[in-house]
Amino acid sequence: MTEPAHELFKIDGVAGIVALGWNVRLNEHMLATSQNVSQLISTRRVGRVGRIDRGWSTILLSTTDSERVRNIGADVAVGDWVLISEDFERVEHVLPRGSALTRRASSDAMRAESHTVASNVDTVLVVQAASGEVNLRRIERELVLAFDSGAQPVVVFNKRDEIEPSAVADLLAQVQPVLAGVPVHVVSARTGEGLDDLRAYTYIYGAETPATIALLGASGVGKSTLVNALSGHDGQVTGEVREGDQRGRHTTTAAELVHLANGGWLVDTPGLRAVSLWMSSNGIERAFADVFAVAEQCKFRDCKHEDEPGCAVQDAIKAGTLQAARLANMKALVAEELELEEQQAVHERGYDRKGARKIIKK
């Protein structure tokens, strides 16, 4: 029989890891997936991965103490909770992940590989710049990743100070069709406007435990400036946006767990030029819930939403209630996922996830 969550918080040694982001949500997950979690905590060798460098991990043991250990035989990610060996030389065990922000890391046609950018994250902030052209297709793709991670997605537009106040309403109207019900905030890391709304995601009020957020977005959207503003210190180097293509220089080269001024935690991730999916579970369905809802009204169950009679999706596009580009992007993501599944099935000799759920085929 597992221990109640409130009893686990009374275990000797747990206070240190609570300060590192071991909160009520994660606590419930650990109780459901690990029978000996209290025993592990009592060893005082449980810590959190703060950074990974070429086979080594910086393990946070408290907000002021850390150890640099080897990752021998351990598949670790920033944000992981791990058990360190008794000699404090290596990662001995990775505890079950409450969430995992994972993307495709390899473009090898014969074998695709995954890369977990961050784990045990409560909220993923999908960040774009309010100034410049809004990339709706990228937002959709990153929302799929965020939904698949198990964390709560939130869309953030930074650099509010670089647009006219009257442009905020137009920006929100432009992004509304792709939000899939997730919250959206328009903020300025430079002036501080709107940052209190983001700080609310870094602490679980009522439970009085810190939470962990992760930033996901391209270079040049001001992620490092956001990190500095939320953390209260200039720990991240910031870069200027290149003239001509309006792309930012990469100022974060490796994912890192950053302690915030209010006690919460943030995983700063490198800017990604391309966002590739990895084995979507229900992220596509959740990110495109409006399309799937309309598709349920199609006359034929195997409707491809092209020129079939009685296609509710095409009717919605003609009526202006659904964007044709949104349908096209969803089909592209579904096709990308199917191709990845086929590659994995060949590589793993029969492992086949086709038909694991109802999807709209291209």
Image (cartoon, rainbow, N blue to C red):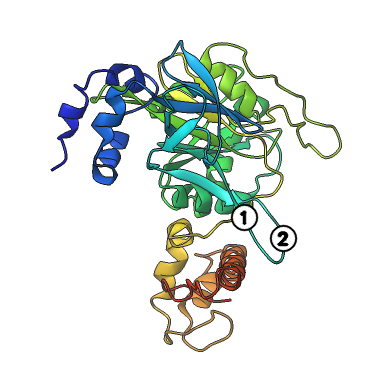
Residue found at the very far right of the displayed protein: 244
Q: In the visual, does 334 lie left or right of 12?
A: right
The amino acid type found where label 1 is placed reads Glu
Q: In terms of image quadrants, where is residue 248? A: top right
Mark 2 Cα shell of 10 Å, populated few (<14), some (14-19), many (≥20): few
Mark 2 lies on residue? 108
Q: Are marks 1 and 2 in contact (CB under 8 Å)?
A: yes
Tell me if residue 119 comes above or below residue 277 in the rendering. above
Q: Position of residue 66 (x, y in %)?
A: 49, 16
Question: Residue visible at 65% across and 45% down?
Answer: 134
- Give the residue number, with chain letter if any, for mark 1: 113
How many numbered markers are drawn? 2
Image quadrant for the C terminus?
A: bottom right
Q: Work out whether 73 lies above or below 267.
A: below
For image coordinates 47% across by 18% down, the residue present is: 260
Q: Which mark is residue 303?
A: none
Q: Position of residue 20 (x, y in %)?
A: 40, 22
Which element type, helix, strand or loop, lies under badge 1? loop
Quadrant that contains the N terminus? top left
* 301 over 228 or under it: above or below: below
- Dot 1 surroundings within 10 Å: few (below 14), some, or many (20 or more)? few
Nearest the camera: 186 or 60? 60
Q: Quadrant of residue 336?
A: bottom right
Q: Is residue 193 visible?
A: no
Residue at screen point 70% across, 35% down: 219
Residue found farthest to the front: 87
Residue closer to the observer: 179 or 256: 256
